[in-house]
Image (spheres, rainbow, N blue to C red):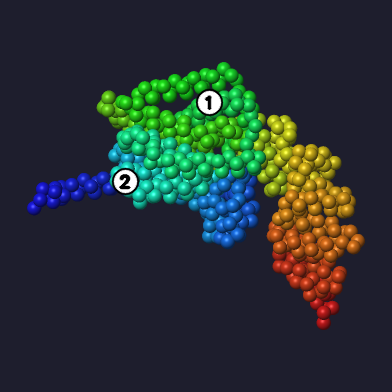
Amino acid sequence: MSREAAATPQLAPEVRRQKLLDLAVWLGLILSTFAVYAQVVGFDFVNYDDPENVYQNPYVRAGLTLAGVKWAFTAAVIGNWMPVTALSHILDAQLFGMHSGMHHLVNVCFHVLASLLLYWTLRRATGARFLSAFVAFVFALHPLHVESVAWVAERKDVLSAFFWFLALYAYVRYTEQPSVGRYLAVVAPFCLGLMSKPMVVTFPFTLLLFDVWPLRRTRWPRTILEKLPLFALSAAAAVVTYLTQRSAGAIQTLPLAVRLGNASVSYVTYIRQMFWPAGLAVFYPHPGSMSTSRAAAVFTLILLVSVVVIRAWRTRPYLAVGWLWYLGTLVPVIGLVQVGGQSHADRYMYIPMVGLLIMLAWGAADIIAKWPRTKPVAAVAGAVVCVACLVLGWKDTTYWRNSETLFARAVDATRDNHLAEEQLGGYLILVQRDVEAIPHLESALRSKPDSVVAHANLGLALMDLDDCAAATVHLRTALRLDPVLAVANFALGRCRMIDQDYRGAVPYFEAAIRAKPNLAEAHSKLADSLSKIPGRVPDAIREYEAALQLGLSSGLAREAHGNLGLLLADVGRTGEAIAQLEAAQQIDPSEEITKMLDRLRAGQK
């Protein structure tokens, strides 16, 4: 018997033990992550980005169709080209309809898969099981990541991270035994990641860092040359993203000094939030200006840390790798090119946090190696950190239950947050709590007097309270700021209807429909107005039919079916009138409709 064969039985128990330990980590990651996020199955969509991405998007709502697939690859959603993410939403709609809880659950599943891949990649690259497990557990449970997981519209985060870590794992395997097939196994998930979220453009840069540590394969320039195709793909994606966001008007014009100052402060803010995740919110308003001394101080701090970790490159390369991972992966979203009105965002730390966690975990290992007696303390501290992340992550997830809990939290956690105030006000209007909405919308206007959304929603709330004089002031201001705003035109039309000025209402409803052709309620109210104008009944019938075809809420659908039935009866289209009145009766029976149906049926005999 050979020496290798004789040794095999002795190694088998140790191999089994190692596999069982890995399995325990996997199970721990799965169970703890679901312990934090299982609650999202009962959560609603929110009224910030979710409408455009999912529940008001006609291509998504229709499920898997050829038109939907074409739209996913050719359209930009909120200034981003993300066909893979769009297709995932379409597939969700095909499988689950608009059941919000299932859309949330898919996010959680991708987050779990990303966490498992992160662990397995670090485990394979470093051989350090417990350090890799610590990084993966904090990644899976940290409150800063709640926004990426519990927000349906942030599917792009969890999806792109899944492909990121899948590509990174494939790269580790490629470096073990380079081949064309293994290289393509890196390229494929990388491309899917780019088509999930453009932030993945920094991935080739992190591969260079991995070459330094933990892979230690710095054979320059070969390691750079082999990544040129990946850098070319990143460059193409960056150009497409910039042009798409510019054409969508998402890029904000701010002075370079302000952008540099905010970027420096944000780098330090993210680190503070990682170690002390208190007061997290869905939106942090951009300050618009920056104290020169404060910006200079934080920039100096970042520079000093960079010098220290680079000087320690030879003895502790993980410090430089982790720090440069953190700095580099944040570059696309740090605000050097300002997209949106936020100063920073929790979701932007989804991938970058990994770099800081690597520094923390392997730094602790070095301390233990130097002072072995600290090992029990470090083990307990690591466990406490993971448990704290679980508890805080679960608590922060509860704020994502619906738009009210989410934006009420943001209002409490931040100052002068116009977006949180206007979104909270908009939600309260939607659930017919207009009196409660008004103070929030007024607060939004104090923070941002030219807020189109706040003026429009405040006009809606006042209109619902029959104060059309005050409503008209805000609605006309909204139209001055945005002349084609559908909701403002619609509300002004409603005000004209309340004043029984049906001819005056028609142009506003027509303007709302031009701006938003799928706005079913505008078609319905236009029909209501036209039906009151002599000679416009045929036009009213067409508008009712259009509204019903686009889809109305049950109450409005009943009213539209009933009104359409009455108009059809008046013009002698009795059979069609009966069908419409029967449809209204099925939604909500009434004695009046029953009598009308009896008369029409009797007339047919």
Residue found at the very far top of the displayed protein: 293
Report whether 278 appears left or right of 510: left
The x, y position of residue 372, in whole percent, is: 26, 27
Q: Name the foreground residue: 411 vs 98.
A: 98
Mark 1 residue type: Ser
**Callout 2: helix, strand or loop?**
loop
Badge 1: how crowded within 10 Å, few (<14), some, or many (20+)?
A: many
- Please tell me whether mark 1 sits on a helix, a strand or a loop: helix
In the picture, the disc for residue 333 is none
For disc 2, the marked residue is: 178
Going 63% across and 49% down the picture, which residue do you hit? 51
Q: Which of marks 1 and 2 precedes in the sequence?
A: 2
Q: In the displayed structure, would residue 499 be above or below residue 317?
A: below
- Residue 227 location in percent, x, y? 40, 41
Image position of 112 with respect to 579: above or below: above
**Res 318 quadrant in image:** top left
The residue that mark 1 highlights is 264
Indicate which label's residue lies in the foreground, 2 or 1: 2
